[in-house]
Image (cartoon, rainbow, N blue to C red):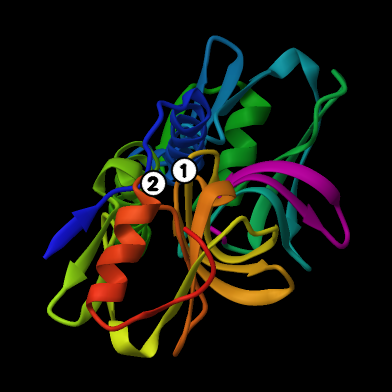
Amino acid sequence: MREFRPPVRGSRTRAVVAGVLATVIVVALVPLLLAATGTSRITYTLAGGTLSVDSGSRLDGRREIPLSTLHEARAVDLQGARRTRGTGLPGYCTGRWSYSDLGAVWQATSCSPRAVLLSTNDGELPVVVTPPDRDAFLHALDVRADFRIELPPPDTTLLTLLAGGAVAVGLLTSVLLVATLVLGPRRMVYRVGDGRLEVRTIFSRRAWQASTLRARAHAPRLQLRLVGTAVRGYYTGFYLADGQRTRVYATDPSAGVLLDGPSRILLSPEDRAGFLDALRAEGAAIEGGR
């Protein structure tokens, strides 16, 4: 079979688009990775007159409450929980939440409704904690007795599985994007022979019987991309061209070959005259000049 290739020209735009898209995908995965790998036990520690509430999460952080700023500490029964920015796992509710009776709070809790509300006079959000023994916790605060409370670890199995799957899909998508935009133009080829026209891209292959095709040189108007890739120097997929749905496999659609038959197809062989002659030899109907 004879091979014809489209013109390939270096494009900084394609490289930049590939890099930006891959970066966006990877960055979007970071919070999920941090949540999956950075979640540990919640701890409440009172030492030296300061209560440290550690969420155990890299995303949700910790709060330091000097007891000199503590305005109120009281037992509450949580109602109407709504997570606004934080983590919610079975037995692990941290970050910013809101409650119907308390309003906005920062919390590091086991998701139990039996909690302690800590309000300060420094303007920060109230803090909600869920010590196993509320009365003992409040008494220790009252008498300034040092303590350390560590809640049971959360079950992060589901989150880890989701994060692992998302990372795998994200990395694969990034690799495919970079390969498509950077290597795609060089891998595109049109092959004519054995009574067929075959179009190969980096990840696909399509073939049509040459005898069912009518071909002509054509400079289309690409009006709208329906499905596929559209960056300078690499156009693949379905487009609205000249007002009609058209399959496009081209690097320079402004100097293309249009084929009509089972599908409307636009290609951009660098050697248009040789390509049309090869199609004619395989039984395609050639219209107009070259």
Disc 2: which residue: 177
Does 63 sit above or below residue 83? above
Q: Position of residue 83 (x, y in %)?
A: 69, 56
Q: Amino acid at mark 1?
A: Ile
Tell us which disc is closer to us: 1 or 2.
Answer: 2
Disc 1: which residue: 25
Q: Position of residue 53 (x, y in %)?
A: 55, 30
Quarter of the picture holding the N terminus: bottom left
Side (left or right) of 14 relative to 280: right
Q: Crowding near pointer 2: few (<14 within 10 Å), some, many (20+)?
A: some
Q: CA distance from mark 1 to mark 2?
A: 10 Å
Residue 101 falls within the magenta-colored stretch: yes
Q: Position of residue 40 (x, y in %)?
A: 36, 41
The foreground one among 121 and 268 is 268
The foreground one among 113 and 234 is 234
Q: How many marks?
A: 2
Side (left or right) of 118 relative to 252: right
Please report contact status of discs 1 and 2: CB closer than 8 Å, yes or no: yes
The foreground one among 171 and 212 is 212
Q: Amino acid at mark 2?
A: Leu
The foreground one among 265 and 131 is 265
Side (left or right) of 1 relative to 191: left
Task: Quadrant for residue 186, please give it.
Answer: top left
- Point out the stretch of residues depicted in magenta: 92-111
Q: Residue at x 30, y 64 (%)?
A: 277
- Decide if residue 119 is in sight here: yes
- Decide if residue 92 is in sight here: no
Q: Residue at x 54, y 39 (%)?
A: 232
Does 34 sit above or below residue 152? above
